[in-house]
Amino acid sequence: MSFTVKLEQFEGPLDLLLELIQKEKLEITRISLAKVTDSYLGHLRENLDISSDNLADFLVVAARLILIKSKALLPILELTPDEEESIQDLEARLAMYKKFKEVSQLLGARFDKRQFSFSRKGFEGVKQGFFPPPDIDAGILEKTMSRILAEMPKAEKLAEESIKEVMTLEQKIIELKSSLRHRIETSFKILTARAKDKTEIIVTFLAILELFKAKIITVEQKEIFGEIMISKKEAIQ
């Protein structure tokens, strides 16, 4: 659907905004956006037939314009990082849209002159060649390529890390069962005497709790911080 403002046709909020700026003969800056805010809001008030599909886009742009004008009227107003990013995004989108409009007008003029484009098949059999603009020389191409290569992300050598093998809880439970098959009683100190690190000690303690929960062993500690004694209740399968 098209939108009419003073006999001009618009496709969306950016089209309207660009037309208002160009009508005032202004560059795309925050100052120009602040100046055309009232005209933009006036368009919304006068055109109540905007479809619901497009209304949200118009309102989003309107909110950003109000924020820009508020900042222009109140220089001491501090914007949040999100608000600042929102304004920068609107400026960038509007500048990009202006380029698209200019290119579309150029293409339209060429089509009016019957200067049509062709698919790749239209050039089959044509000798390939490189035809740069007349003002381009080897030095400019070299500088451009050097700049592009400098901006490319460089491969970073990551630090090598070794993966430490850790005994799982299931493996430790099997190990404890095997150990208790040959003895009636043991202690937590004996079971962790050959532990390689704190992780294995923790896994051993969790395995003891699992066996106690399954009523396969009994656990006894006669005093606080005393030795933890483990004994099997019955023959372990």
Image (cartoon, rainbow, N blue to C red):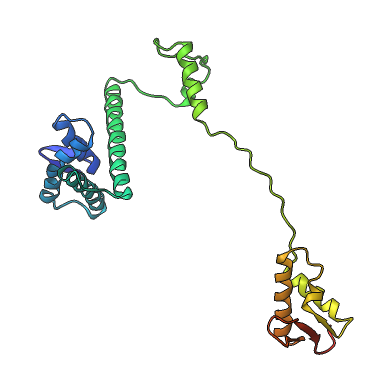
- Residue farthest to the bottom? 233
Residue 151 in view (yes/no): yes
| Quarter of the image where one finds residue 167 | bottom right
The residue that appears at 56% across and 33% down in the rendered structure is: 154
Front residue of 221 and 144: 221
Question: Vertical placement of 127 versus 182: above or below?
Answer: above
Vertical position of residue 44 compared to residue 195: above or below: above
Q: Position of residue 143 (x, y in %)?
A: 47, 18
Q: Nearer the viewer, residue 90 or 191?
A: 191
Residue shown at the point (51%, 27%) measured from the top left? 150
Q: Is residue 170 left or right of residue 132?
A: right
Indicate the quadrant containing the C terminus: top left, top right, bottom left or bottom right. Answer: bottom right
Horizontal arrangement in the rendering, residue 92 relative to residue 215 (left or right): left
The image shows a total of numbered marks equal to 0
Residue 187 image offset from top left, x and y in percent: 80, 80
Q: For residue 14, which quarter of the picture?
A: top left
* Residue sitting farthest toward the right: 182
> Viewer-proximal residue, 60 or 225?
225
Determine whether 2 is above or below 95 in the image: below
Relative side of 172 to 112, left or right: right
Percent position of residue 3, x then y: 17, 44
- Residue placed most toward the observer, 22 or 114: 22
Quarter of the image for residue 34 reads top left
Residue 86 x %, y %: 30, 46
Q: Is residue 72 above or below residue 118?
A: below
Q: Residue at x 32, y 49 (%)?
A: 82
Can residue 12 be seen in this snapshot? no
